[in-house]
Amino acid sequence: MQPYALTVDKFLDHAAKWAGDREVVTGEAGRAARRIGYAALRARSNRASGALAALGLRFGDRVGTLAWNTQHHLEIYYAAMGAGLVCHTLNPRLTAAHLAAMINEAENRALAVASNLMPLLAQVAPQCPTLKHVILLDGDGPASEALEGSGARLWSYEALLSVHGSAFAWGGFDEESPAGLCYTSGTSGSPKGVLYTHRSNYLHTLRSLQAEAFALTRGDVLLVAVPMFHANGWGLPFAAPAVGAKLVLPGRHLDGASLAKLMRDEEVTVAAGVQTVWLGVAEHLEATGEDLPALKRVIIGGSSCPDAQLRRLEQRLGVCVQRTWGMTELSPLGTVAAPDAPADRKGASGRPLLGLDLKLTDAAGATLPRQRGVVGRLKVKGPSVVDRYFKAEAEALDPEGYFDTGDLARIDEAGNLTICGRAKDLIKSGGEWINPSEIADIVGRDPTVGQVAVIARADPKWGERPVLVVEARAGESIDERALLDGLRGKVADWWLPDEVVRIDTMPLAATGKIDKARLETDYAEGRLGGAVGREEGVGAR
Amino acid sequence: MQPYALTVDKFLDHAAKWAGDREVVTGEAGRAARRIGYAALRARSNRASGALAALGLRFGDRVGTLAWNTQHHLEIYYAAMGAGLVCHTLNPRLTAAHLAAMINEAENRALAVASNLMPLLAQVAPQCPTLKHVILLDGDGPASEALEGSGARLWSYEALLSVHGSAFAWGGFDEESPAGLCYTSGTSGSPKGVLYTHRSNYLHTLRSLQAEAFALTRGDVLLVAVPMFHANGWGLPFAAPAVGAKLVLPGRHLDGASLAKLMRDEEVTVAAGVQTVWLGVAEHLEATGEDLPALKRVIIGGSSCPDAQLRRLEQRLGVCVQRTWGMTELSPLGTVAAPDAPADRKGASGRPLLGLDLKLTDAAGATLPRQRGVVGRLKVKGPSVVDRYFKAEAEALDPEGYFDTGDLARIDEAGNLTICGRAKDLIKSGGEWINPSEIADIVGRDPTVGQVAVIARADPKWGERPVLVVEARAGESIDERALLDGLRGKVADWWLPDEVVRIDTMPLAATGKIDKARLETDYAEGRLGGAVGREEGVGAR
């Protein structure tokens, strides 16, 4: 059969040829600030490849991005990957020191930045000796100038395209070539780089497009509210052009009002993002009485979403909500609940699709004799799963070639996966394990509770003890005693948290996950107030 | 990222692990004669690999099949491919001489045969010196005996499994390894072998599973009425286990009554086959007043289906009909109309999905400057498209790497493909081209017409002239004059057929396509009767 390298430039080529007029729309605070057809976007992106080559970048060089979900960011994605460069997406919510460490480890030679992130980049660039070119994606300014305090030159993207843009022959290299680089979020452990290949991204895209997964078609209008800087934006910047779906990129503003306006104006049919984003949209709709008649499905991921919250979301948005589970190391899609999954989901994130295999092991790595209905350590295998971290010497795989997710999980008889928490989040109390996710899941069903986390506090007698941290839903007030009473009989008595801490705003990491590491530090350093349990001794121990 | 060879054994592995209880049902004259879960089928098929190895077959050896759509045939598919052997599907409707020529070119060392095809095989085997083992899939008999008149040994499949079956480690070879061999139908030219690879089949499967194509899910019940011996059964024996869909294989009997009963009993949701099969089902339903409440979609292909006939089918079956276009050389899916394609299709077979690119050229092979809205010669490119025929020395590709389909086609502004006929079917009359497909398409809309073909007859003055051949719909009688009148004004006067020939039963090739070569031979040799036009001089010339 014909040779055909599985490279990601083919996604945009396909869209340009077969859906050339379908649009990529960029939002700005809910307004459609910019729109372009795939054919024109492909032409610009391809010329940007020529410009990157003119700056001296060569096959395999890393190009950083520090940007929101915008057309320009998408153009740099394909400009870099199509030319055989590596698109290294950086998270603007990290500190300058973290960013500099990643840029230096990746030896980025160029970096594309959103103008409103220039103040951050100005702190970062002086610490990054390999950085020779900074491309200002959306700002005015001279064609190029020296970037103060660093060895890099600052380019205006449009001027760079005018001066150095030229047609570039995309692809033509091996499909195992690196395409993207993304660091893990670091909410559990220090960030590690995952180097995606063209092949891994291509196969991930085909997997995600199945009717039981994202099921996108050319008729769809897809809102990507998950950041493009995080884990390939769940692969959606590939999946949308691969089918020629209209793509809506919301820019920086992910508040409920902005998203709702953009979704209504652009007639979004499928939307993807973390649950906190959809809670914001749902609350906005509830407050204003507006609706989103075109919306059919919402895809959530990034953190667990209790059944009760999922049902509330479905009711408020009036659509099907698909729960997913994934990781940066998985490109990132692991499992996804089918659009027609039954309503009684029991926390499940769906079944694995062809191309991702799962197994459960014990803590020592031995495959559990029973794989269904028991909790085990989740390991995964597939063509879009990491085998070793960027610049790591050792493989991250077990002897059977599986990657250890670090998650605890249960698989039901029908094959549906439920993540039961992080193995390393387990709280060891009196020599026994407490699973904070099980506690949080039960508390999360209480209608007064918005966000919930269960953290560990050091305890001189028991080693560790659980602490419940809750944020109330808007307009609700929380009865701590009732929350603890609600746990009795559902978890062992000695699992009952020693304290309940109310906070106004749950700290979230850049990806929307609750930042448990920060909660634990804040708690340890006395910065979390409102403890109710300790005074009253409601804890079982 | 992790190494992971794209080999087809992974489809059945996936089904066995994640949909082990979903069934593969084999029909026999409409009755479910046999059913098995994917886990048990995988175990049998894997043991059959061990048996083939025990018979001395080695990586790359060809295993023929001469069988209907049955569980046993499916087991041999995976037994051969999983073990690195090549599954060479043979068409039982070919002559013994044709079959022997294919078996000899392919140097088949073993062949699996349905018991009711043994009389045919008994004629074939003595002509095939490479054939050492014949496996009787579903018959009784001794474990093994000499096959009379040939050098081969005849095995009973179940006995072979008992005696030589053993677990076999599937896969582990390069994904570019050959997996299957199928000869083109030969309705237009002599049969040529197409050698599929594991990679081409794997990527074809992922392409076909997209929401805009076959869109299969685990909840579906798929009836495969297209023969498994023809072009991978449209890839469905791969696609169904790849998602864990229940699979219904109808055996030999494809009449309307048998299929309708099987579909109703097994609650088939998606069904695939040529249009003549669905006409039979529709007529049965009409005659009996039965319905198929579970059926959602019917996928048709193999020959063009005029809009009027498609609408009739949709009305009678009460479902969406998806028109497809494909070829043996394309694995075989080319384009497919989306399930939600608009009703006014104008003959289109849908858009190409990622992984198949199209271009239109002139007769000399030059790319047409306009690719939309004009008729050109269709060429295709992709990882599941042939690059050279089996044992051919020359590549079958143009300098840009495209395969010439031999079809004439038009692509509309939205990218929908309409096949306008075979380039070699064009009738050259007075130095100008007549397209028989356009004429047939118009005539096919007449409610009295069941099947229609336009063939060429040699003409001393004009070179060739068109002849219309029609079969009436059941219970209808055809007015030839009215048919010709219906063409006036819609085609050029000199395109009007010189004659109209009524026949009782249109000759069909094994794949359900009208056998035009046979019609033309029969006509030339005076075996087609009922000519009306010639006597009356209705032709324009």
Image: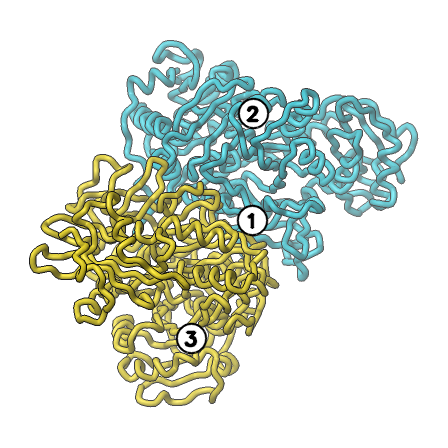
Chain colours: A yellow, B cyan
User: Is A32 placed above or below B332 here?
Assistant: below
User: Is A226 placed above or below A130 here?
Assistant: above
Q: Which of marks 1 and 3 is in front?
A: 3
Q: Nearer the viewer, residue B57 or B280?
A: B280
- Amino acid found under the numbered disc labelled 3: Ala
Secondary element under disc 3, as helix, strand or loop, is: helix
Q: Mark 3 lies on which chain?
A: A
Q: Nearer the viewer, mark 3 or mark 2?
A: 2
User: Disc 1 marks which residue?
Assistant: B403
Secondary element under disc 2, as helix, strand or loop, is: helix
- Amino acid found under the numbered disc labelled 2: Arg
Q: In which quarter of the image is residue B336?
A: top right
Q: Distance between the residues labelled 3 and 2?
A: 61 Å
User: Disc 2 marks which residue?
Assistant: B264
**How would you rate the neighbour count of disc 3 (Cα within 10 Å): few for under 14, some for 14-19, many for 20 or more?**
many
Task: Let me know if residue B191 appears in the view.
Answer: no
Q: Nearer the viewer, mark 2 or mark 1?
A: 2
Task: Tell me, for residue A53, which label it has, or none.
Answer: 3
